[in-house]
Amino acid sequence: MYSTLERSLGRSFSLFRRGVHSQYVITNFNEKNGLKEIILNHEKTKNSLSLEMMSSLIEVINSNKDDVSLRAIVLAAKGNVFSAGHNLKELQQSTGVDHHKLVFKKATELMKSIIQSPVPVIAKVNGFATAAGCQLVATCDIIVCSDTSKFSTPGANFGIFCSTPGIAVGRSVPKSRAMYMLLTGEPLTAKEAYESGLVTKVVPADQLDAEVNKIVDKITHKSRKIITLGKEFFYKHMDLSLLEAYELGEEIMVKNINMEDGQEGIKSFVEKRKASWSHK
């Protein structure tokens, strides 16, 4: 838990990971006014999702996640490649099957940490997102990218079909577009990604920060408790049949209405005033 002073001043951190020959900063993050921005910071490997990178991301995403002052998380990257996906050096035969299992287990843990985060996770993409990097982007709740960004799942080109990236991509875009990406390896332009539903918004690179900040501002003016409830329900109902989803939806709506912030929202609307959220 962070102090009141730290919350008021904002925080800026770097997670250090020991390399074979030197020490480098693999993930930067800063937090201020309820927003935690996490920056993939290893251009040398095109921000590949190595075990170290994934462990670092999981650690930062989950840190202080229950602090009510945290309202949103933004994933960004340094350089012109958001992430090139898994580090293929870790998937060579010499590293062994057990290591390969660990890599993909860690990747699943990373995706679950985004889905299960109590606050919205927003991808801010300015560059290329490929393979597991595309999976990382597609797993986020909201994706905003620059108009020069591209997205691909080119694993088949290298003899490794993008099976796990296809899980996230296949739940974001129509089947034929997902299969096009997975079978040909050809990238989608930012415009094509938007038209396919893979990304939420496309803006010029110099407007990327402003657009993401605008979205974060909309989120932070709402009750964190209600946002958390809604996000959790959304992912639960996606795995249910239509009728089961409606049954669960009825329960959640009643629960929502009878929460402190649910009643505050109703009262503020009736009384024509700004709501005062307790986030409880």
Image (cartoon, helix red, strand yellow):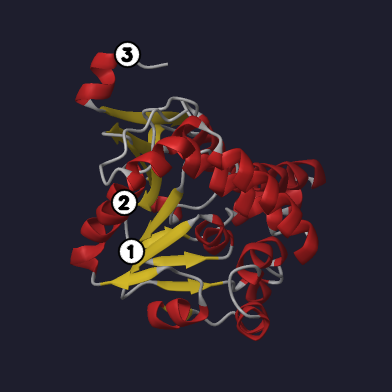
Of residues 88 and 189, the one drawn nearer to the viewer in this rendering = 189
Q: Is residue 74 visible?
A: yes
Task: Give the number of the mark in front: 2 or 1.
Answer: 2
- Which element carries disc 1, helix, strand or loop? loop
Q: Amino acid at mark 1?
A: Asn
SS for callout 2: helix
Numbered-mark total: 3
Label 3 – label 2 distance at C-alpha: 25 Å
* Residue picked out by circle 1: 126
Residue 241 seen from this side: no
Q: Which sits earlier in the primary sequence, circle 3 or circle 1? A: 3
Please provide percent x and percent y for residue 262: 48, 39
Image quarter where the N terminus lies is top left
Q: What's the residue at 69%, 45% (across, down)?
A: 251
Mark seen at residue 218: 2
- The three-letter code of the residue at mark 2 reads Lys
Q: Quadrant of residue 206?
A: bottom left
Residue 71: image location, x then y, percent: 38, 38
The front one of 93 and 211 is 211
Give above or below for 43 relative to 26.
Answer: below
Helix, strand or loop for disc 3: loop
Q: Reading the chain from its start, which is encountered first: label 2 or label 1?
A: 1
- Residue at image mark 3: 3
